[in-house]
Structures are given as C-alpha cells and as structure tokens.
Amino acid sequence: MLTSSTLFILLVMAYGLAIIAGGIFVLDSERRQALQNRIQRAGNWMLTMFCGIGDGVQRTSGSTGRMLLESFRRPLVFILHHRLHAAASMGLLALPIILVLFFLSSRSLPGYQEMPQTTDPVVLALLRGEQLAPPPPMPPEAFITPEVAAIRQDLGGASREWLALDADFRQRLLIVFQLMEKKGYPMALLEGYRSPERQTYLASLGPQVTNAGAFQSYHQFGLAADSAFVRNDKLVISEKDPWAMQGYRLYGELAESVGLVWGGRWKMMDFGHVELRRQGTIQRK
C-alpha cells in the first residue's frame, strides 16, 4: 500500500518528467540535439565510472550503455512524434495545480482563522508579542448608574471576565484597548462571555436589544465583546456624545485592523460591539 510520502514522491517525479518533456518541446532542433548529445555523454561517463576499468568490462558497459540509451531514445522519439498529445497530457497534469492556486487566491482554507489585514508595524508587533494584561476593572456600581441604565439595561448581570473570552480574541481586543488608551480613549469591557440563558433573556426584550437567540451570538463562545469609553472615572456609552462618536470611529478602525468585525457597520449599528468570526461556530436561524 502506498503511503502518503511515497505518493508525494511519485507525484513530484511525474511532474518533474512532465516539466522536462515540456522543456524539450520548446527547444529548437539544434539545441535539442545538443541536449541529447550531453545526455549521451553523461550516460557514457556514468557507465564508465560504475562499471569499472578493463576491456572486457568496458565492452559490457558499452553494450549496457547502448541498451540504456536505446531505452531512453524510443520514448523520446515517440513523444516528439506526438507533440500535441504530450502537450495535452502536460496540460492535464498542470490543471489541478492551476485550479488550487486560483481558488486559494480568493479563499482561506477551512479551519484556519482569518488573519488581520494590516501593515501597521505597531499592530503587527503587538500581535506577535507577549500576552497583554487586561486593564484594572471598574467598580461594579459604575455599570448600574442611572445614566448607564438609560442606555444599556441589565449590565449588572453581565460577565466582564477577560479569562472567559477566547484567547486569540482576548489578545486582539486588548491590543485595541491599548492603542485606544494611547490615543486618549481609555476603555472598559461592558460584557464579554454571555450564557445561553442570558442571551435568550436579552432576545426576549425585543429587536432593539438583540435579534440573536441562544447560540446565535458569538458572545456564547467568548468571541464577542461590548465596550465603552471611560472619562473622568465614568462610563461614556452614547454615540450622541461627539467625543464618544469620534472614539467609536477610531475603535472600529483599529478593531478591523487586527481582524475583528465591528458592529458599527451593521444595519442596526452597535458601535461598542466587536467579534471574531469563525466559520461554523454559531447556529443560523
């Protein structure tokens, strides 16, 4: 039974022969004859080296060399006389590689996460660097003030545990938080992981809160988070504040630069929401 490594070697050899044959076809008659002469001389030299020295041995090696050259000559003559068929065969050999390269240019392989499309050296360095630490948590009462409750209800029962988030998503979000703070926008996590029961409850409050039921949100998998800004030790959530709106635009830009999806581009805009999408994670309705 052929192993995967043996099959790979055989395929490489087959493609190598196809490439050599294709190279012979594109040569003119003079260069093709010169190549054949070189191959013949190389064959004679190798036979002389391996068959030993002596007249009797040389006669034997000469006979063997002629047999080997004849065995190579016949297929070459056949190929040269059937160029169109050989060219079509090489095209069929090359077709799988061409198709794979074509489809891989526009699609990512299943099972692999999308990598951030950014050339920012700071962002790339952070992504490749050490794991960042979450910012100090705000006191619980900061999330249940009348000003906050008027915009976001039931934040008192929301999870703000950074360790409950997916490790890759957590690192990307912390990078965004760090960059935002350097630009004068310190941020706080409003809600990260969300249990299926809480998701069902929030969906029951109506579409103005969420349209996603249990296991239809990336929150259930630790791949989504809602965040807001901190100004004078207080949460600033509403985009009606010009300072906050400017911050949300910057937040969305930085989040997208590290491969996250920003809710500010949705039809039902959610400026503080970001998520890391993975194929096959959530259930569709």
Image: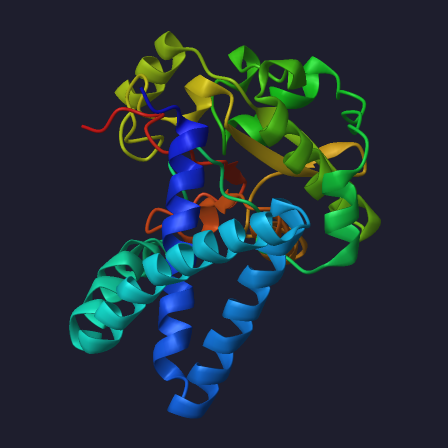
Residue 245: tell me if it is visible. no
Relative image position of residue 245 (x, y in whole percent): 59, 55
Residue shown at the point (38%, 83%) measured from the top left: 26
Residue shown at the point (52%, 52%) measured from the top left: 61
Q: Who is closer to the viewer here, 92 or 197? A: 92
Residue 232: tell me if it is visible. yes
Vertical placement of 276 versus 84: above or below?
Answer: above
Vertical placement of 101 versus 218: above or below?
Answer: below
> Dividing the picture into quarters, in which one does residue 23 lie?
bottom left
18 vs 117, left or right, is: left
49 vs 200, left or right, is: right
Residue shown at the point (32%, 51%) measured from the top left: 267
Relative image position of residue 78 (x, y in whole percent): 22, 69
> Dividing the picture into quarters, in which one does residue 70 lie?
bottom left
Relative image position of residue 129 (x, y in whole percent): 80, 37
Q: Quadrant location of the N terminus?
A: top left
Residue found at the very far front of the displayed protein: 56
149 vs 2, left or right, is: right
Tally of marks? 0
